[in-house]
Image (tube, grey):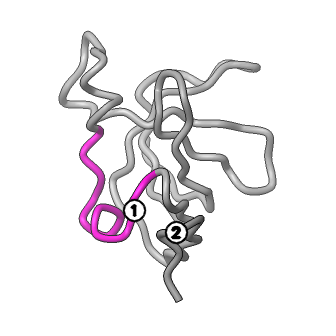
């Protein structure tokens, strides 16, 4: 069951490389391709998760991170102390934070 949550989408080393921190929590979500691609989950599913258009047009990792209201769909049950696999269905109220030489004004 999908739900809306405020989060920060960033890029990290390791698997999966795309992760959402749910603002106000200690929860980290690993971003994968949509539920129609499972099972089984492959490396390609996390390397190219197929972001919604509103995210794809502004997200340029590792040069920026996004804060947004994400429509998140869990791909597995939540387990205490573990990163949960999810996909992003849509996003709204997007704020882009740029870093380094790619910084935009």
Answer with the quarter of the image where residue 56 lies. Answer: bottom left
For the stretch drawn in magenta, what is the main secondary structure? loop
Mark earlier in primary sequence (1, 2): 1
Nearer mark to the viewer, of 1 and 2: 2
In the image, residue 70 above or below residue 30 = below
Image x and y of residue 70, in percent:
49, 59
Residue found farthest to the bottom? 105
- Residue topped by disc 2: 101
Q: Quadrant of residue 1?
A: top left
The furthest residue to the top: 40
SS assignment at label 2: helix
Give the answer, above or below, for where 81 lies relative to 56: above
Q: Is residue 66 left or right of residue 37?
A: right
Q: Secondary structure at mark 1?
A: loop
User: Vertically, is 97 above or below 24?
Assistant: below
Q: Is residue 18 above or below residue 81?
A: below
Tell me the residue that label 1 is attached to: 59
Span highlighted in magenta in the image: 49-61
**Residue 55 drawn in magenta:** yes
Q: Which residue shows up at 47% across the image and 69% down it? A: 102
Residue 101 in the image, given as x and y percentages of width and height = 52, 68
On the image, the x and y values in percent for residue 30 come to: 51, 32
Circle 1 residues within 10 Å: few <14, some 14–19, many ≥20: some
């Amino acid at each position: 069951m999908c739900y809306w949550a405020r989060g920060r989408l960033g890029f990290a080393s390791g698997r999966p490389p795309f992760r959402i921190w749910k603002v106000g929590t200690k929860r980290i979500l690993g971003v994968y391709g949509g539920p129609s691609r499972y099972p089984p989950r492959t490396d390609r599913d996390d390397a190219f998760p197929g972001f919604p258009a509103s995210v794809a047009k502004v997200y340029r990792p590792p040069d920026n991170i996004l804060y947004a209201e994400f429509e998140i769909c869990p791909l597995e049950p939540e387990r205490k102390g573990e990163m949960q696999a999810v996909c992003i269905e849509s996003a709204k109220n997007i704020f882009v934070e740029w870093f380094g030489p790619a910084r935009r004004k």
